[in-house]
Image (tube, grey):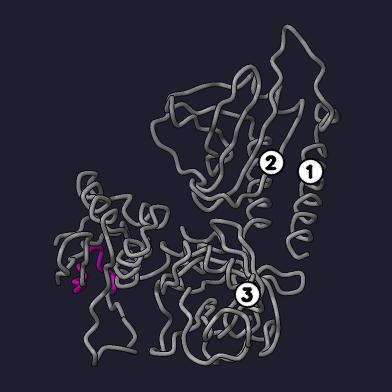
Amino acid sequence: MTRIWRQAAVVVFVLISLLILQANDAAAQTMMLKPKKSNEQQQHIMIMTVRSGQQSSFMSELQIESQEINAALRQSKHVPEAEIDYYSDIDIVLKSAETVHYRLDRSGQLWNEAKAEKIILPDNLAKKLVRLAEGLRTQHYGKLLTWQQATELLPKKSMFSVTELETGLTFHVQRRAGSDHADVQPLTKEDSRVMKQIYNDKWSWKRKAILVHSGDTWLAASMNGMPHGGDGIPENGFSGHFCIHFLGSSTHKSDTPDPAHQMMVHKAAGQIKPYFESVQPSVLARSFVEAMYHQDHELLLPLAKEMPKEKLASILHVMESLVSIREQIPPKSKGQIHTDELGDALTTEIRLPVSIHQLNKPRRSSVYTFMFKRETAKSPWHIQDIIE
């Protein structure tokens, strides 16, 4: 039933969005009406979609038919543009005589990646497209709440649904315990079956970005997929519980937030870019290793965008053959907070010991040395290279 309510919410959002496009322009008053056929003027239908990754089957969609857009496209300028700052999770399709895919520039312009060409739209329309994109993203992703806020919405013994961000598969759970995060269990054998399907029918400690539905709120969260610990719901086909994390929550073994869970929480909130731009080099280095371990291209690429292309290609080749890659934390360091006292420094290095296990190869120990740089003392840190 929660899925039905979510779909209904998207429908309401679409209707409100269409009213926004109509508001300030009489030329848009024929919106949602099929344009009159014309031999002289080409009519376009715009379809905007949001999904967390190019391979994600779970998506939100908005279809727009507007005379305002048609008029703007007929008068628009096409200029060469090799690279832009665009919404990585937004895809725009223009359907007319042919179907063309575009990226949405963060200023609201359209970019044809295949042709390396930008369509320059009027400022008022560009701003409307940005508002529609941000609204659709809000509908698609979860709300970023702290663990303290989430635990009030999800008290012990409460029941709620979980939707995995990539597949859109949904199952129901009950929170049984947990003081630093939520210890939960699937309600029924069918819920356990769906959860296991999310993990390709193999229980795993790997983290997944999820949406937790509580009342009318969708919360950004992260889960693992391994039954462990105490069991409290008989006949559910799940021996033990699994963990759900929120912003700032920690694991059983540490007093500090787990970098993989925090990365997935921000992914579930649609906030992975600002998250990577706000954290210190030690977190970026650990997040990079976690993205490799989870074999998640959508998380790895924004971390590696300033690395040499040949080095990135080498990293991706290793990632494809990984059985596992884990940070090797000395026993005395577990639970300690990683700090970066860098002051006004514009460059730094982080050495991270790792254990690497590739398919058909013996496990080996290595050290990744991450080279970081930033433009100013207030600019985000970026990985420039990784030396093994």
Real-space Cα separation, disc 3 to disc 2, in angstroms: 46 Å
Q: Residues within 10 Å of mark 1 (few under 14, many from 20)?
A: some
Residue 356 position by quadrant: bottom left
Quarter occupied by the N terminus: bottom right
Amino acid of disc 1: Ile
Image position of 181 (left or right of 380): right
Please say if 112 is above or below 296: above
Most foreground residue, 277 or 66: 66
Quarter occupied by the C terminus: bottom left
Sequence order check: which comes first, mark 3 or mark 2? 2
Q: Main secondary structure of the magenta part?
A: strand
Please provide percent x and percent y for residue 287: 35, 67
Image position of 36 (left or right of 329): right
What are the residue bounds of the magenta stretch? 343-354
Q: Could you tell me which secondary element the residue under label 2 belongs to?
A: helix
Please provide percent x and percent y for residue 132: 68, 45
What label does residue 189 carry, if any? 3
Residue 338 position by quadrant: bottom left
Dot 1 corresponds to which residue? 20
Residue found at x 21% / y 70%: 350
Residue found at x 57% / y 82%: 147
Give the label, 3 or 1, closer to the camera.
3
Residue found at x 70% / y 80%: 159
Please say if 99 is above or below 214: above
Residue found at x 42% / y 66%: 278
Q: Could you tell me which secondary element the residue under label 3 belongs to?
A: helix
Image position of 250 (left or right of 63): left
Q: Could you tell me which secondary element the residue under label 1 belongs to?
A: helix
